[in-house]
């Protein structure tokens, strides 16, 4: 791992607008991502965790501009992604690939495995038919699929195997960054570990960088070098993985951690229970959006938004306690 | 990989579809009927020694016999020959008009569904306008403008059925567009054209095939209706609807002039409908 930043995003924001009502339109704005900044270093895995609806997928999709209209800066290898033309954007999508959560929905049911994995090469006009065939065979071998799977259709595979097909598709163009959006959360627990280990192995083998989105802390701990915790479209804490798990600072992070069973007996379990519902992102609380569920809430929390600040080298927290 | 069950099956989606279609008896009956009429249409000259429009006024309105299987009409033409040749016309009109409306409707539906926005508004309103008229009235109006002939009836029927296909495809495209594999296709850098032709179209086409089969049945009836009203095929063409119209004056003398073309229409329509229903059952569970 080097210290070079492969991806750097700053102040990324995206609001979705929906209008309700037929006669009297009521504009409803959802701040799905609200001023997110982080960088991903070459060769590392940055995990992003947070509850459902906190904007993890939106962040990932904004980076690839699969969702348009995001505000803020996205810098990938020195290129300003936000200002790329349609043509250059398509080229960028050779270097950034995505693995999806649902291995059933993300593969075209009418295409064979061969076509699914070969398609990125066709789209980017890489190689001759013969070279492409060889490359497909190579990546299939890497992800643990057999050559006799080539002519099969996705529905003939189990969930874990399907996710391997999705990984092979992401791998085939030799990307630099892979954005994995909850790649194992749809799989059985017994298969999750296999797929995670596969992801780790290919990362080492091909020098990949991951942006790894998950809601399961155990999964994130297993795979990440650094972890960012998201709450209602904002990042509340970023730290190296061990630091975050051993020494969490933000009350939300602490609450998340105390809700998972810890195998380590020396870990003194603080029972912090998240009370109340997640506030609606269309009508977020004032100040610190977490103050409605925080047990160390102060007056300032209701009034002012805390900014992300460094409290130790590599450990940033957005909380008025620090 | 010991935890991953390996599903051992070597079935293409087509094989699966065919197996489920084949299990449907009625659909097979429909297929048999349609196949029968297609064979008759193709080999018409071999089945009869008469020409469909050769008149023999000495043999007017004969009952069925060994030399005239279905009897003769008021011009002494062999009814069997006319019904057999009529199959050519009806199948021709049915297939061609549906091909036309399916192609145009699918194109418009895809554009409206995929690109949305103002294109969708314009196309959808156009469909609404066409659908606001009863279809046979609209067809009559179009034929009235173009002039009565079998070819113009075909064009009219094709136009009338465009919105049915258009709406069907549009709604299917709207749902397929939301599928994650479309997002995945964009994520690998695919452009709109390839997404449309390789991903959206193949996954939206099943209902068009079902609707197309059912629409052939409707088109045959509509062509017969236009022929009956004098707006379609003109004399001396052996078109079934036109034959029905001509039979009205001789109904009591020669009921065969009514029954045989009538049954021919009924059976072809039934055949296409049975196939259509079978296709729907075979394709639907997989198409959601
Ligand atoms: N296309 C959209 N239109 C309107 N609102 C949207 C859209 N996509 C996402 N949102 C909203 O933005 C917020 C963040 O959604 P996002 O999918 O990024 O969450 P997530 O963290 O990935 O959640 P999950 O764990 O459920 O996948 C949610 O409140 C969601 O309802
Ligand atoms: Mg998500």
Image (cartoon, rainbow, N blue to C red):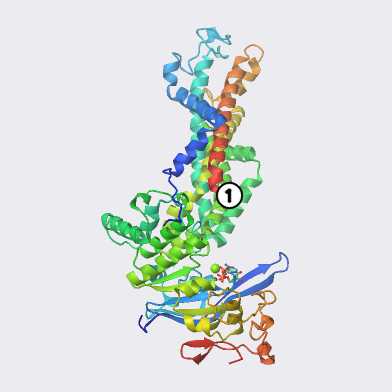
The residue identified by callout 1 is B167
Relative depth, front residue between B148 and B112: B112
Res B59 quadrant in image: top right
Res A83 quadrant in image: bottom left
Count of numbered tags: 1
Q: Secondary structure at mark 1?
A: helix
Q: Residue at x 37, y 48 (%)?
A: A151
Q: Position of residue A81 (x, y in %)?
A: 43, 76
In the rendered image, the vertical position of residue A298 relative to residue B150, given as above or below: below
In the rendered image, the vertical position of residue B47 relative to residue A241, given as above or below: above
Quadrant, the C terminus of chain A: bottom right
Relative depth, front residue between A53 and A319: A319
Q: Chain of mark 1?
A: B
* Ligand 1 visible in quadrant: bottom right
In the rendered image, the vertical position of residue A24 relative to residue B132, given as above or below: below
Q: Position of residue B129 (x, y in %)?
A: 63, 49
The response on whether ligand 1 sits within 8 Å of label 1 is: no
- Residue B21 visible, this orientation: yes
Quadrant, the N terminus of chain A: bottom left
Relative depth, front residue between B154 and A262: A262
- Residue B237 visible, this orientation: no
Question: Among all residues in the image, which is located at the extreme right?
Answer: A23
Relative depth, front residue between A286 and B41: A286
Q: Position of residue B78 (x, y in %)?
A: 51, 14
Res B160 quadrant in image: top right
Question: Among all residues in the image, which is located at the extreme front?
Answer: A265
Q: Residue at x 41, y 74 (%)?
A: A84
Q: Position of residue B113 (x, y in %)?
A: 54, 56
In the rendered image, the vertical position of residue B149 relative to residue B187, given as above or below: above
Q: What crowding class fits label 1: few (fewer than 14 Cα within 10 Å), some (14-19), or many (20 or more)?
A: many
């Amino acid at each position: 791992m080097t210290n070079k930043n492969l991806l750097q995003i700053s102040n990324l924001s995206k609001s979705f607008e929906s209008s309700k009502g037929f006669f009297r339109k009521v504009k409803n704005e959802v701040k799905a991502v609200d001023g997110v900044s982080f960088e991903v270093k070459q060769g590392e895995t940055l995990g992003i965790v947070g509850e459902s609806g906190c904007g993890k997928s939106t962040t990932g999709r904004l980076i690839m501009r699969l969702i348009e209209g995001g505000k803020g800066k996205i810098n990938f290898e020195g290129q300003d992604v936000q200002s790329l033309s349609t043509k250059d954007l398509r080229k960028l999508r050779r270097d950034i690939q995505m693995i999806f959560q649902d291995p059933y929905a993300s593969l075209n049911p009418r295409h064979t495995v061969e076509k699914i994995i070969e398609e990125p090469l066709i789209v980017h006009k890489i190689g001759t038919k013969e070279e492409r065939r060889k490359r497909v065979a190579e990546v299939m071998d890497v992800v643990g699929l057999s050559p006799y799977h080539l002519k099969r259709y996705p529905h003939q595979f189990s969930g874990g195997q399907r996710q391997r097909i999705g990984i092979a598709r992401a791998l085939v163009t030799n990307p630099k960054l892979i954005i994995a959006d909850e790649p194992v959360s749809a799989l059985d627990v017994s298969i999750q570990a296999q797929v995670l280990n596969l992801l780790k192995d290919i990362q080492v083998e091909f020098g990949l960088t991951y942006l790894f989105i998950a809601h399961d802390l155990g999964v994130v701990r297993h795979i990440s070098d650094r972890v960012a915790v998201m709450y209602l479209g904002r990042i509340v804490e970023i730290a190296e993985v061990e630091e975050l798990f051993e020494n969490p600072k933000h009350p939300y992070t602490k609450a998340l951690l105390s809700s998972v069973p810890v195998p380590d007996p020396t870990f003194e379990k603080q029972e912090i229970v998240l009370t109340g519902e997640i506030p609606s992102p269309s009508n977020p609380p004032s100040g610190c959006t977490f103050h409605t569920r925080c047990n160390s809430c102060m007056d300032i929390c209701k009034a002012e938004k805390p900014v992300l600040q460094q409290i130790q080298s590599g450990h940033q927290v957005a909380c008025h306690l620090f | 990989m010991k935890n991953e069950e390996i599903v051992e099956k070597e079935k293409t989606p087509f094989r699966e579809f065919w197996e489920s279609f084949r299990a449907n008896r009625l659909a097979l009956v429909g297929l048999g009927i349609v196949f029968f009429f297609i064979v008759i249409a193709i080999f018409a000259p071999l089945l009869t020694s008469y020409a469909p429009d050769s008149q023999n006024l000495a043999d007017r309105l004969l009952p069925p016999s060994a030399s005239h299987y279905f009897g003769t009409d008021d011009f002494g033409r062999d009814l069997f020959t006319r019904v057999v040749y009529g199959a050519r016309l009806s199948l021709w009109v049915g297939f061609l008009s549906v091909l036309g409306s399916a192609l145009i409707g699918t194109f418009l539906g895809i554009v409206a569904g995929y690109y949305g926005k103002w294109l969708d508004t314009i196309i959808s309103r156009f469909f609404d306008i066409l659908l606001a008229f009863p279809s046979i009235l609209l067809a009559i109006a179009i034929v009235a403008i173009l002039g009565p002939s079998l070819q113009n009836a075909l064009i009219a029927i094709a136009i009338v059925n465009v919105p049915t296909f258009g709406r069907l495809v549009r709604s299917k495209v709207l749902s397929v567009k939301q599928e994650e594999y479309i997002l995945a296709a964009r994520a690998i850098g695919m452009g709109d054209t390839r997404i449309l032709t390789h991903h959206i179209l193949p996954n939206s086409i099943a209902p068009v095939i079902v609707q197309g089969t059912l629409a052939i049945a409707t088109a045959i009836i509509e062509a017969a209706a236009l022929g009956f009203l004098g707006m379609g095929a003109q004399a001396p063409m052996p078109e079934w609807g036109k034959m029905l119209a001509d039979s009205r004056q001789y109904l009591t003398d020669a009921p065969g002039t009514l029954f045989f073309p009538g049954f021919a229409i009924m059976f072809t329509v039934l055949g296409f409908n049975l196939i259509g229903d079978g296709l729907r059952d075979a394709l639907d569970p997989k198409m959601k």
